[in-house]
Image (cartoon, helix red, strand yellow):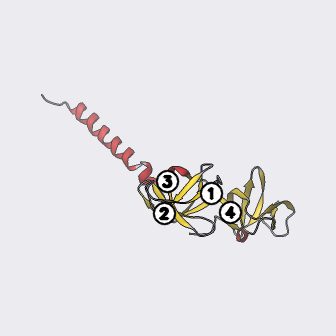
Amino acid sequence: MSISGSAIGILATGILVTGILAAASPAMAQKETPYWASIDEPTARMRTGPSTGYPTMWIYKRKQLPVKVVARYKSWRKVEDPDGTQGWMHARLLTADQTAIVLGKKGQVQVMRSKPDSDAKIIWRVEGGVVGKITDCEGQWCLFDANGLRGYIARDIIWGDEPL
């Protein structure tokens, strides 16, 4: 049986498309460590090693808590939490959404401003431990969104955006 020129062209195109799709797979598109992520589930276990066979170190009940991903092993990520504790979480428990936690103890109040300027109007006050999404980080300020309350917060009073 002979193969026509057009059949060879279709076959070659199929192989090329398959190769492109394989190169664009999520495994290839993963960020290099370290990078920022956040917990994407209401409950997430941190383990001593990269499988469910390892003991649980911590159970986090804080969706959107920022973590620093410091290593990868297959579908597991070694993460560091805001207190500096390191352990392993399954990748499905994490999201690339960048969040931050306000530093300081509960009851200690920090301010959010209307503009990225220390002289700008104070529009919200947040306690240490509050978690929110961050965007538009420039200079010493990030736009911080804590459940719809948006304002600029100083980078030195949040954890989750230090250059890596």
Q: Nearer the viewer, residue 58 or 133?
A: 58
> Are the two marked residues, 1 and 4, in contact with CB atoms closer than 8 angstroms?
no
The type of residue carrying mark 1 is Gln
Residue to which mark 1 is pinned: 98
Q: Is residue 10 above or below residue 152?
A: above
Which residue lies at the image location 69% right of the left edge and 62% below the top edge? 101
Residue to which mark 3 is pinned: 90
Q: Residues within 10 Å of mark 2 (few under 14, many from 20)?
A: some
93 relative to 133 in the view: left or right = left
Q: CA distance from mark 4 to mark 2?
A: 33 Å
> Are the two marked residues, 4 and 3, in contact with CB atoms closer than 8 angstroms?
no
Q: Is residue 103 above or below residue 6?
A: below
Q: CA distance from mark 3 to mark 1?
A: 18 Å
Question: Closer to the N terminus: mark 3 or mark 1?
Answer: 3
Q: CA distance from mark 2 to mark 3?
A: 12 Å
The type of residue carrying mark 4 is Cys
The type of residue carrying mark 2 is Thr
Question: Closer to the N terminus: mark 2 or mark 1?
Answer: 2
Pair 2/3: label in front: 2
Task: Give the percent coordinates (x, y) of residue 75.
Answer: 44, 53
> Are the two marked residues, 2 and 1, in contact with CB atoms closer than 8 angstroms?
no
Which quarter of the picture shows residue 46?
A: bottom right
Residue to which mark 2 is pinned: 48
Task: Give the percent coordinates (x, y) of residue 31.
Answer: 49, 59
Task: Give the percent coordinates (x, y) of residue 141.
Answer: 73, 66
- Quick one: SS at disc 2? loop
Pair 4/2: label in front: 2
Residue to which mark 4 is pinned: 137
- Quick one: SS at disc 4? strand
Task: Give the percent coordinates (x, y) of residue 5.
Answer: 21, 33
Q: CA distance from mark 4 to mark 3?
A: 28 Å
